[in-house]
Image: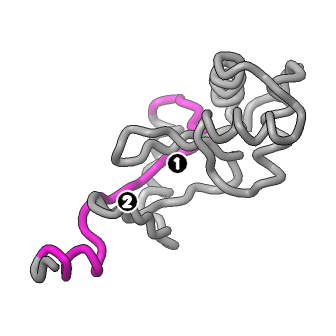
Amino acid sequence: MAAKLKRTRSQQKILNLLNTIQQAKSAQDIYIELRNRDEALGLATVYRALDALKLEGIVKTRTLANGESLYSCLKEDKHHLTCLQCRKSIPIDQCPVHELEKQLQRSQDFKIFYHTLEFFGLCDRCQIKSVNPE
């Protein structure tokens, strides 16, 4: 992980929230949740703080099929199967690219904070619906 930098109060509030909720949230949801906790920050401040935390290597971003970004604390790589119709996201337990990540770090002298792996298609329920529309 990256060396710990001095964080702003905004960055620390967001990091505390992400550690508390233990799930990925959009910047808008983070903004709303902070307001609900009486720790109001402007939406632009939330985005700036999230960008800084990403560059520090402690927050990761996952972009959904609809283009929305979800932010979470960097703990371990999570991978998903995402349904393009109902937007259901199914976690995948195994990761086929960890060894490739290690090789790239060595061969390219590149510090990798995290990677994402996402497959897009139709879940079992949406496949049935597309064959038998109601």
Q: Is residue 75 left or right of residue 110?
A: right
Q: Earlier in the sequence, mark 2 or mark 1?
A: 2
Residue 97's x, y, as percent? 43, 57
Residue 60's x, y, as percent? 61, 40
Question: Please, is residue 39 above or below residue 91 in the view?
Answer: above
Q: Secondary structure at mark 1?
A: helix
- The residue drawn where x is 76% and y is 46% is 18
**Number of residues whose C-alpha sits closer than 10 Å to that of mark 2, classed few (under 14), some (14–19) or many (20 or more):** some
Question: Please, is residue 21 above or below residue 5 in the view?
Answer: below
**Number of residues whose C-alpha sits closer than 10 Å to that of mark 1, classed few (under 14), some (14–19) or many (20 or more):** few
Question: Please, is residue 75 above or below residue 80 in the view?
Answer: above
Q: Secondary structure at mark 2?
A: loop
The residue singled out by tag 1 in the image is 102
Residue 128 within the segment the image draws in magenta: yes
The C terminus lies in quadrant: bottom left
For marks 2 and 1, give the one nearer the viewer: 2
- The residue drawn where x is 52% and y is 73% is 93
Foreground pick, 88 / 110: 88
The residue singled out by tag 2 in the image is 87
- The residue drawn where x is 81% and y is 43% is 17
Q: Which mark is residue 22?
A: none
Amino acid marked by disc 2: Arg
Amino acid marked by disc 1: Lys
Q: Which residues are magenta?
A: 108-130
Foreground pick, 66 / 94: 66
Foreground pick, 110 / 29: 29
Q: Is residue 63 left or right of residue 22?
A: left
